[in-house]
Image (spheres, rainbow, N blue to C red):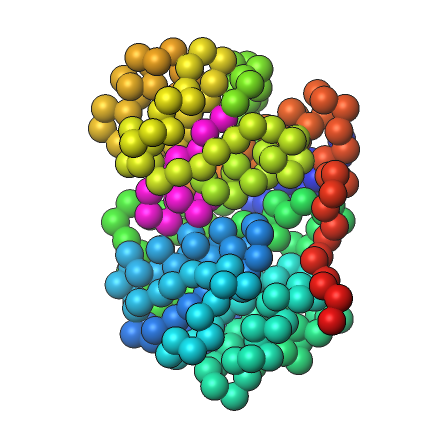
Amino acid sequence: MSRTASEIATQPSCWRRAAEAGAEFGGLPRPGERVAVTGCGTSWFMAIAYAALREAAGQGETDAFASSEFPAGRPYDRVVAITRSGTTTEVLDLLGELRGKVATVALTADPRTPVMDAADAVAVLDWADEESVVQTRFATTALAFLRAGLEAAGPLPAGVKTVAEAAVDAELAVSEPLAEAVVAAEQWTFLGRGWTYGLAQEAGLKMREAAGAWTESYPAMEYRHGPISITGPNRVAWVFGALPEGLAGEVAGVGGTLVAHATADPMADLIRAQRLAVEIAESKGYDPDHPRNLSRSVILAP
């Protein structure tokens, strides 16, 4: 078993620990604050998911930006940065630019890195750190931590499960066999609405990183506006969260394979996409722990 596969399987326990830690951490956004969330790569997609979920919970206006595209002159009450390594150049540069202007909090896996001094408050999720270059459990644990903070601050949006409930769904997701048609497909399109759109983007990235696969990601309601043209026999349309009315029939009508675990927590469903990425990578003879052209952290020259 690859190291990535082993780390994927630990997510239920990581989320349960994050549920406790996130509810107790004092540095997370407070209801009513205007907040921005930032990161790079996978962390950016988790930022997108959290931002949409926080707004849906009615806890305040929340934006998400890739760190390199952050509008530093825009006023916020708090900025949340997600960085597994704690060394990503764009994140550290942004935190340095924001210092003294806005309260900042960082989520990281490594307490021995520069981010510890770059942010005003730091949550260290070192129990979710990874040996694999590819992010899986740290990303979802960071999102679970942020979700737990939302739970502690007020009611969740209708239909959104607690982190504890998500961990129960994750137990099935780490062990349930993947459908043969999904594993054998040649192309995968991931779809989501609201906070699950960030998860759809992450699923596509994971497949590209680990398996070099042909994947695309869109808001679910945008699927009819062009992306459906790519779907057909031996191609998958995978929906995170609620399935838009009529979409199943449209996917079937063009010969595609639909994946929709509508009753499962969407974050748990992301585990299935992570597992698929590893399985496809291994079937191609790739090393999912060390994908081509990637490193644990992007550190740019001064």
Q: Does the magenta stretch include residue 112?
A: no
Give the residue displayed 39% in from the left and 59% down from the top. Answer: 51
Q: Which of 250 and 135 is in front in this view?
A: 250
| Quarter where residue 116 is shown | bottom right
Residue farthest toward the left in the current orientation of the protein: 245
Give the residue displayed 52% in from the left and 55% down from the top. Answer: 44
Q: Where is residue 1 in the image (x, y as percent from the top left)?
A: 76, 31
Q: Nearer the viewer, residue 221 or 165?
A: 221
- 202 versus 105 height, above or below: above
Range of magenta residues: 188-199
Q: Where is residue 115 in the image (x, y as percent from the top left)?
A: 66, 73
Q: Quadrant of the C terminus?
A: bottom right
| Residue 255 visible in the snapshot | yes
Position of 171 compared to 54: left or right?
right
Give the residue displayed 57% in from the left and 15% down from the top. Answer: 184
| Residue 146 visible in the snapshot | no
| Quarter where residue 82 is shown | bottom right
- 10 versus 233 height, above or below: below
Residue farthest toward the bottom in the current orientation of the protein: 100
Q: Does the magenta stretch include residue 192?
A: yes
Give the residue displayed 77% in from the left and 33% down from the top. Answer: 287
Position of 113 compared to 276: left or right?
right
Question: How many numbered discs sit on the rendered protein?
Answer: 0
Q: Position of residue 171 (x, y in %)?
A: 54, 37
Q: Position of residue 151 (x, y in %)?
A: 37, 61
